[in-house]
Image: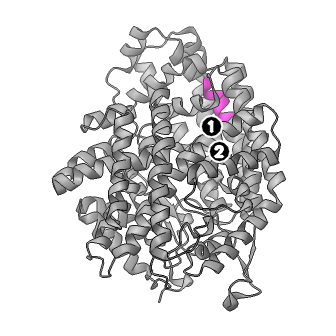
């Protein structure tokens, strides 16, 4: 049996030691490099830069960005490890001030590049393939770039504005503790969010209900406070991106950052609005039938099929399952995934103040990514492990692209992670995982499809509505009523929803940390389902196509990257095809 102490925990000292001379040195070097970089400012403002000088200037700019990323990544990882660590919180605050100063002093480079005529920018960037698409994107952003003084003010404002409010949300919710009164074996003990969430998938209906009610008792208790945080973030986002930068609506700013045309996102959400309720509504009705429930409630959404507690999966066995699943497509992909744990870059222990959820953080191209999760021995945790190690493999495959282009844009960022989960599901369903997968795994696949496709699409639809409502002066209760209506539209007559779920939106970190992020999950999952169709036809011969997509990072637009592998166009028919794969899984339940 796996014990918590035996689970891997990352070694952040491989990045930095807190209060170490190396941390102080790199912080100082970042400032020193920035001061040195200022010698280019007058030349850049005059436009008097030769091709050789541009390359030197670009190299220095990238070196500064590398140090910024390394320092901020350490701060973020250390905070995720312990959200109540006052030293880390203090360091984060100081670092944000330093990086804002660095950003402001190097801003002239962006304005120089945007000011050039097209033929001059082509001449200067000739022979620089590692940065070509990033440089192109800088120029296309010119219509939404403000003057240099205005950009400096926004950068400084964010330190005590949006960034500070987001950290406040993380800090407040990171300290939440939940009662365990519904579990006699833990009565009187407090649970973290991660520990409580295990009960959402309990085989006992009453336990599921009590766990959810406890969850929203805590979040709902702070609902009006959290709503104020959301309102502040929403207003800040609109003021900057619509009022100042001239985007037509708040989500357009995210679409631009994702390098996606607005019509692609509109098509994705339009198809999802019609297909998700139809397909998942049918699934929930089928689930109610198979579970022999008189009524199907929101508490039962993730109920397991077997009606019995899952057998614990030891961590080493989980890691081996993921390795074998990835090897079915590509041994090289599996090797990259395993390197995370081998490099001591994986944190799987349950810790008191650890950030909830899971993520993969890619620092620099030459570094092994860092993965955080909380492993509790469930099958769900095995899939989470596959997901996050898929992210890591994605970054490692694109390491040759350089720091400005190795990380995929959000729409493609879920490709390797979700494909990794599909490979693992295949292993369970065909029996090669060493256990009988059967309906339990089909339930998992369909539950996950709902959570990643349908749920996230309706999150995105709510977020669009919520930002508009805040602009019109909506209260916390009005936002919650709108969210409850969103749930009613999703579920229709397939289930009943308790009133406490009106506060569910307050516990979705992306609404606060990265506005309009969530549609990327729907995009990525439906994309993978389309790729899965090809994989089923071609087998391992498909591997080079997927590897090509992953190895390109963000060195081209998502549409161009997919087209290079023979995928697309991204229209209504494409998204409907992805939903067709979900329907195939649903039919397999019969």
Can you identify the residue that label 1 sits on?
32
Is residue 546 rendered to the left or right of residue 199? Answer: left
Residue positioned 41% across, 56% down in the render: 392
Q: Is residue 172 magenta?
A: no
- Report the disc number at residue 28: 2
| Contact, mark 1 vs mark 2 (Cβ under 8 Å) | yes
> Which element carries disc 1, helix, strand or loop?
helix
- Taking depth in this image into account, of 391 and 473 the one nearest to the observer is 473
Q: Is residue 550 above or below residue 153?
A: below
Q: Is residue 105 magenta?
A: yes
Q: Is residue 21 above or below residue 232?
A: below
Looking at the rendering, the stretch of residues picked out in magenta corresponds to: 101-107
Instruction: Tell me the quarter of the picture where residue 391 sits.
Output: bottom left
Residue 485 x %, y %: 67, 48
Residue 455 x %, y %: 54, 52
Instruction: Tell me the quarter of the picture where residue 388 sits.
Output: bottom left
Is residue 136 rendered to the left or right of residue 97? Answer: left
> Which element carries disc 2, helix, strand or loop?
helix
Q: Main secondary structure of the magenta part?
A: helix
Residue positioned 23% across, 49% down in the render: 534
- Taking depth in this image into account, of 120 and 456 the one nearest to the observer is 456
């Amino acid at each position: 049996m796996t014990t918590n102490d035996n689970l891997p925990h990352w070694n952040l000292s491989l990045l930095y030691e807190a209060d170490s001379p190396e941390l102080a040195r790199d912080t100082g070097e970042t400032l020193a490099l920035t001061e040195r970089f200022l010698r280019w400012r007058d030349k850049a403002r005059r436009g008097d830069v030769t091709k050789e000088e541009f390359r030197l200037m670009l190299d220095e700019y990238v070196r500064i960005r590398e140090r910024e990323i390394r320092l901020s990544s350490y701060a973020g990882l250390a905070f995720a490890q312990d959200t109540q660590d006052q030293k880390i919180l203090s360091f984060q605050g100081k670092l944000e001030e330093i990086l804002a100063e660095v950003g402001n002093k190097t801003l002239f480079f962006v304005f120089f590049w945007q000011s050039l005529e097209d033929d001059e920018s082509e001449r200067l960037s000739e022979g620089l393939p590692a940065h070509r698409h990033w440089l192109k994107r800088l120029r296309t952003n010119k219509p939404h770039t403000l003057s240099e003084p205005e950009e400096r003010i926004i950068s400084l404002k964010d330190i005590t504005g949006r960034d500070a409010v987001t950290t406040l949300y993380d800090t407040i919710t990171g300290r939440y503790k939940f009662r365990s009164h519904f579990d006699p074996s833990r009565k009187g003990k407090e649970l973290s969010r991660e520990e409580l969430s295990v009960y959402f998938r309990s085989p006992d209906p009453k336990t599921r209900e009590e766990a959810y009610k406890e969850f929203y008792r805590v979040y709902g208790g702070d609902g009006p406070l959290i709503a104020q945080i959301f309102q502040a973030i929403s207003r800040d986002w609109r003021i900057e991106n619509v009022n100042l930068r001239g985007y037509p609506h708040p989500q357009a700013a995210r679409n631009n950052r994702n390098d996606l045309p607005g019509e692609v996102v509109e098509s994705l959400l339009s198809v999802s609005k019609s297909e998700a309720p139809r397909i998942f509504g049918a699934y929930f009705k089928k689930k109610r039938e198979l579970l022999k429930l008189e009524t199907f409630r929101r508490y039962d959404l993730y109920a397991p099929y077997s009606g019995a507690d899952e057998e614990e999966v030891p961590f080493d066995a989980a890691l081996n399952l993921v390795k074998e699943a990835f090897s079915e497509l590509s041994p090289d992909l599996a090797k990259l995934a395993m390197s995370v744990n081998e490099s001591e870059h994986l944190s799987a222990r349950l810790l008191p103040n650890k950030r909830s959820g899971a993520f993969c953080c890619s620092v620099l191209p030459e570094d092994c990514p860092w993965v955080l999760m909380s492993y509790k021995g469930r099958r769900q945790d095995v899939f989470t492990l596959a997901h996050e190690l898929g992210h890591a493999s994605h970054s490692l495959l694109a390491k040759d692209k350089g720091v400005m282009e190795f990380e995929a844009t959000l729409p493609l960022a879920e490709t390797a992670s979700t494909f990794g989960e599909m490979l693992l599901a295949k292993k369970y369903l065909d029996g090669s995982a060493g256990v009988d997968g059967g309906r339990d795994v089909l339930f998992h696949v369909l539950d996950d499809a709902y959570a990643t496709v349908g749920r996230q699409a309706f999150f995105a639809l709510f977020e669009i509505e919520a930002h508009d409502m805040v602009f019109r002066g909506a209260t916390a209760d009005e936002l919650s009523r709108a969210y409850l209506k969103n749930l009613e539209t999703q579920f229709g007559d397939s289930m009943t929803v308790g009133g406490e779920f009106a506060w569910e939106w307050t516990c979705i970190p992306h609404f606060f940390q990265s506005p309009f992020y969530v549609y990327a999950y729907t995009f990525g999952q439906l994309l993978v389902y389309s790729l899965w169709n090809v994989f089923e036809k071609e087998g391992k011969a498909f591997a080079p196509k997927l590897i090509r997509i992953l190895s390109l990072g963000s060195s081209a637009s998502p549409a161009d990257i997919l087209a290079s592998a023979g995928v697309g166009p991204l229209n209504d028919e494409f998204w409907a095809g992805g939903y067709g794969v979900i329907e195939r899984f649903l039919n397999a339940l019969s």
